[in-house]
Image (cartoon, rainbow, N blue to C red):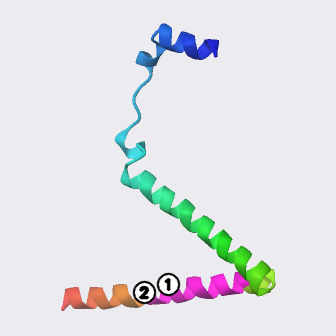
Amino acid sequence: KTDFINFISDQEWKSIEPVSSWFGPSSFLMSSMSALFQLSMWIRHCHGYLTENVGIPVWGSYAVFALATLFSGLILGLVSGALETDCLV
C-alpha cells in the first residue's frame, strides 16, 4: 500500500512510457488474442461436454476435434482456392 501511495505522491508514474497502441486493450492484436482465448475456452467446454455428458472417451473427443480441424482446413482451402481462381480469371 505504501509503495503505491509513494508511486502516486512522488509522481513516479510520469517516468513510465505509455503502452504502444499495438498492445492497447482495444487494438486489433489484443482483440484477436482475446478471441483465441475465448475459442480455447469454448473448445475446453465442448471437450468436457463430450466426455462427461455424452460419454465419449477422451481419445474420441480428441479425434472429433482433429477431424473438425481437418475438415475446416479443407473448407478454408477450397474457399481460398475458389476466390483465388475467381480473382485471377
Task: Give the extent of the magenta segment.
Answer: 61-75
Quadrant where the N terminus sits is top right
Residue position marked by numbered label 2 in the rendering = 77
Looking at the picture, which amino acid does disc 2 mark? Gly
Q: Nearer the viewer, residue 20 or 40?
A: 40
Q: Which mark is residue 20?
A: none
Q: Secondary structure at mark 2?
A: helix
Looking at this view, name the residue that lies furthest to the front.
Answer: 53
Q: Are marks 2 and 1 in contact (CB under 8 Å)?
A: yes
The picture places residue 24, in percent across and down from the top left corner, at 40, 43
Residue at screen point 67% across, 70% down: 44
Q: Which mark is residue 73?
A: 1
Label 1, residues with CA under 10 Å away: few <14, some 14-19, many ≥20: few
Q: Nearer the viewer, residue 40 or 80?
A: 40
Q: Is residue 13 left or right of residue 48?
A: left
The count of marks equals 2
